[in-house]
Amino acid sequence: MNQLNITPNLINEQTDNPDIAVQVITDFEKEIIKFIGQGSTNKQIADKLSISPENLDKIIAKLLEKTNTRNLAHLMMYTAVNNIFDLATQQ
């Protein structure tokens, strides 16, 4: 049985240790993730953010690479498991 690897590899804080690769999810990327979680299409997200669908595709590809996830479902699981959003403070 294959096991889904969802271990943390993102650090949302800066570090003084040069040996640690820091991958920070930006506020803009978090906004994109929220739209994805709400079920918005890429075209809807691009329109809401006033960017081209092509640029959105590039941003999402970089985000998948940054988080070492394979697709949007895996990205959503990753953000949930790694508590990327502090749901206690969101309304």
Image (cartoon, helix red, strand yellow):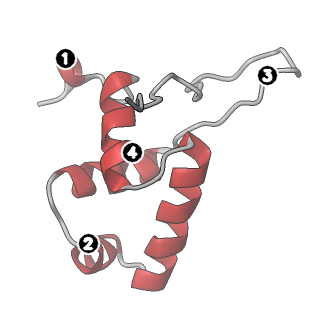
Distance between the alpha carbons at the discs numbered 4 and 3: 22 Å
**Residue drawn at (59%, 36%), measured in percent from left and top?**
24
Residue nearest the viewer, comparing 70 with 15: 70
Residue mark closest to the camera, 3 vs 2: 3
User: Mark 1, residues whose alpha carbon is within 10 Å: few (<14), some, or many (≥20)?
Assistant: few
User: Mark 2, residues whose alpha carbon is within 10 Å: few (<14), some, or many (≥20)?
Assistant: few
Q: Amino acid at mark 1?
A: Ala
Residue matched to label 4 = 75
**Residue drawn at (26%, 49%), measured in percent from left and top?**
34
The residue lying furthest to the front in this view is: 1
- In the rendered structure, the answer to whether residue 15 lies left or right of residue 10 reads right
Distance between the alpha carbons at the discs numbered 2 and 1: 25 Å
Distance between the alpha carbons at the discs numbered 3 and 1: 29 Å
> Quadrant of the rendered structure where residue 89 is?
top left
Residue matched to label 1 = 88
The residue lying furthest to the left in this view is: 91
Q: Amino acid at mark 2?
A: Lys
**Residue drawn at (57%, 29%), measured in percent from left and top?**
10
Residue mark closest to the camera, 4 vs 2: 4
